Image: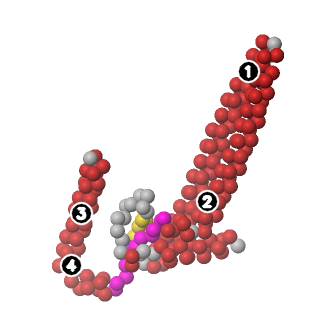
Amino acid sequence: MKTTASILTKFTFGILIAGSIAACNQNKTADKPAAATSAVGDSKETIVYINSDTLLSKYEYTKDMNKRLEEKGKASQSDLQAKGQAFQREVADYQKSAATLPADQRQATEQRLQRKQQELQGYQQNATAEFQNVQATENSKQYDKIADFTKAYAKEKGYKLVLLFSKASPVVLYGDPSLDVTSDVVKKLNEAYTKEKK
């Protein structure tokens, strides 16, 4: 019920904004009919959008970045797995010989294994944190590349506003397909990335 009310509130808010914009545009049209006619005659859009889902699936830099992150993740996981298995073997060896060891040696071995287990857990936490930092850095670089390109692209094309559409975070609920510049942006980003790689 709460979600339905939230969606209804957002929808109502969206209608109010759209109505306000339409009312403002009508007032401008009434005040300046010649300017409105010339803007329509231009048919040059000043607001466009990019579908980020499509962009990220077709941008070669993103594909390469994901491959690098996947390889790093697999290497890290493999390293952790090897250390974990070595520790498990050490514990198994101790358990086999524990009954024959004197009490003081048994206690010392258990304490050593406990320290080793804590070190292994710390190593795992550090590896996870390091991977998350690398991932955040890579995502930041990707964002900067796309944002810098989009700024130059918008300036070149005369766009005043470039919106980002994504199913995961739908700020734009609908955009006329004629305003979608995703394929042109992907093409030019990939061309720039190919030159950069050489």
Q: Which residue is mark 3?
A: 15
Residue 44 versus residue 65 in the image, above or below? below
Q: Of the residues shown, which amino acid type is indicated by label 2?
A: Asn
Q: CA distance from mark 3 to mark 4?
A: 21 Å
Q: Which residue is mark 2?
A: 66
Q: Of the residues shown, which amino acid type is indicated by label 4?
A: Thr
Left or right for 162, reference 196: left
Q: Residues within 10 Å of mark 4 (few under 14, many from 20)?
A: some
Q: Are marks 4 and 2 in contact (CB under 8 Å)?
A: no
Of label 2 and label 1, which has the lower sequence position? 2
Q: Quadrant of the C terminus?
A: bottom right
* Segment tinted magenta in the rendering: 42-53
Q: Nearer the viewer, residue 99 or 81?
A: 99
Residue 114, quarter of picture: top right
Residue at 21% across, 78% down: 29
Q: Which residue is mark 4?
A: 29
Which of discs 3 and 4 lies nearer the camera? The answer is: 3
Residue 82, quarter of picture: top right
Mark 1 residue element = helix
Residue 12, given in percent of the width and then of the height, sits at: 23, 58
Residue 102, given in percent of the width and then of the height, sits at: 81, 13
Residue 174, given in percent of the width and then of the height, sits at: 34, 68
Q: Of the residues shown, which amino acid type is indicated by label 3?
A: Ile
Q: Which residue is mark 1?
A: 110
Residue 108, quarter of picture: top right
Which of discs 2 and 1 lies nearer the camera? The answer is: 1
Q: Are marks 4 and 1 in contact (CB under 8 Å)?
A: no
Residue at 55% across, 76% down: 187
Mark 4 residue element = helix
Q: Residues within 10 Å of mark 2 (few under 14, many from 20)?
A: some
Q: Nearer the viewer, residue 180 or 104?
A: 104
